[in-house]
């Protein structure tokens, strides 16, 4: 892609998110979300592969549906209460519709079905943008409306953690596994949103760091299926020995970074007398842990068949920048000792 066009599209992505962040009026927020969607579509379809075009079409249709729902709900809110302000949502009907529209935007279960399909059709770089940056604007809106309907949030959160764990079990495609991982992590964030918004932001940040690291590892190895991971030990032996730690951090095992948000969320849910919810969420994390272990096993404990077509790509050195990978990997593995600092920051 022409670098000027790429720069304009990335600028559009950033501008759309910033407009949504800065808006207090529903029309402005909607406009930011639309700019976001329209800026990423050419990036998704840039390879002109039928799969990429199909994924782009699916993405466009779901995002357009969510944006239409959002616009409809905000007009309904203006009709019922006479105001367009995001923070002044009072009527339960528009709040519920907007929560569901934003859930569709970020891919929460039960409106998640588009996410694995779309991510599967994209290359890893655009997939990374979709899994991280594209979640920011809708999340800012969810945090701002602070939905009063707590039941719907807990239902969305629990179904997301369960489906995110269950859906990834049978997958062999890495991008689909990462999509289900994304659904499960978003479920954890939504569960705790109404009790501690700052904890939701902490979880979002750690999820971004770990996902960034995982995508960059797969990109360095040019891996898209579990089988291709088995060849990674010849390309980057040191990275291959660190990758299981990143994956287990995504799964939330101590003493890795990913344990911190899960631990704090379970603690918060227990404080709010939601012991059953916390138990279901913790058990669903085990489902996710299984497929992260599968990836770790495939990477470090299996030998790839040594046929000629398999050996050729091993010898090519990657041109990818390794500094972002090094920083994100270190953060994905080593930030657990900062938990006391994080809890001090989270304290109201």
Image (cartoon, rainbow, N blue to C red):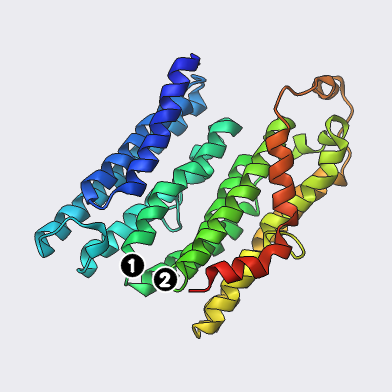
Q: How many marks on residues?
A: 2
Badge 2 vs badge 1, beta-carbon distance below 8 Å: yes
Binning the other alpha carbons within 10 Å of mark 1 as few (below 14), some (14 to 19) or many (20 upward) gives many
- Callout 1: helix, strand or loop? loop
For residue 22, the mark is none
Q: Give me the C-alpha separation between circle 2 and circle 1.
A: 7 Å
| Image height of 240 relative to 52, above or below | below
Q: Is residue 148 visible?
A: yes
Which one is in front, 161 or 337? 337
For residue 194, the mark is 2
Q: Residue at x 68, y 44 (%)?
A: 328
| Image height of 239 relative to 295, above or below | above
The residue pinned by badge 1 equals: 147
Where does the image place residue 60, in percent across and percent down from the top left? 36, 35
To which quarter of the image does residue 343 belong?
bottom right
- Callout 2: helix, strand or loop? loop
Where does the image place residue 209, in percent across and percent down from the top left? 62, 48
Q: Residue at x 36, y 48 (%)?
A: 21
Q: Residue at x 50, y 16 (%)?
A: 3
Is 180 on the left or on the right of 21, as rendered?
Answer: right
> Of label 2 and label 1, which has the lower sequence position?
1
Residue occupying the far bottom of the picture? 273
Q: Is residue 286 visible?
A: no
Is 245 on the left or on the right of 115, as rendered?
Answer: right
């Amino acid at each position: 892609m022409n670098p000027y066009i790429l720069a304009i599209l990335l600028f559009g992505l950033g501008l759309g998110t910033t407009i949504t962040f800065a808006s207090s009026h529903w029309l402005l927020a909607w406009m930011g979300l639309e700019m976001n969607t329209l800026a990423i579509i050419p990036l998704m379809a840039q390879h002109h592969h039928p799969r990429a075009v199909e994924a782009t079409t699916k993405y466009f249709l779901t995002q357009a549906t969510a944006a239409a729902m959002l616009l409809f709900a905000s007009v309904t809110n203006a009709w019922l209460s006479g105001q367009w302000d995001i923070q002044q949502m009072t009527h339960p009907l528009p709040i519920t519709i907007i929560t569901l529209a934003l859930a569709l935007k970020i891919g929460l279960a039960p409106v998640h079905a588009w996410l694995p399909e779309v991510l599967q059709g994209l290359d890893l770089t655009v997939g990374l943008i979709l899994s991280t940056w594209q979640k920011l604007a809708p999340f800012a809106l969810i945090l701002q409306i602070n939905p009063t309907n707590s039941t719907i949030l807990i239902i969305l959160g629990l179904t997301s953690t369960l489906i995110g764990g269950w859906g990834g079990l049978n997958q062999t495609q890495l991008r689909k596994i990462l999509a289900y991982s994304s659904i499960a992590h978003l479920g954890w964030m939504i569960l705790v949103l109404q009790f501690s918004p700052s904890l939701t932001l902490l979880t979002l940040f750690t999820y971004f760091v770990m996902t960034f690291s995982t995508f960059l590892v797969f990109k360095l190895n040019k891996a898209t299926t579990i089988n291709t991971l088995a060849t990674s030990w010849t390309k980057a032996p040191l990275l291959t020995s660190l990758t299981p730690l990143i994956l287990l951090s995504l799964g939330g095992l101590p003493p890795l970074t990913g344990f911190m948000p899960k631990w704090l969320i379970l603690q918060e849910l227990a404080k709010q007398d939601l012991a059953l919810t916390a138990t279901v969420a913790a058990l669903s994390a085990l489902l996710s842990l299984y497929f992260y272990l599968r990836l770790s096993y495939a990477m470090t404990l299996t030998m790839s068949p040594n046929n000629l077509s398999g050996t050729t790509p091993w010898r090519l050195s990657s041109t990818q920048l390794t500094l972002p990978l090094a920083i994100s990997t270190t953060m994905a593995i080593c930030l657990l000792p900062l938990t006391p600092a994080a809890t001090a920051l989270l304290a109201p």
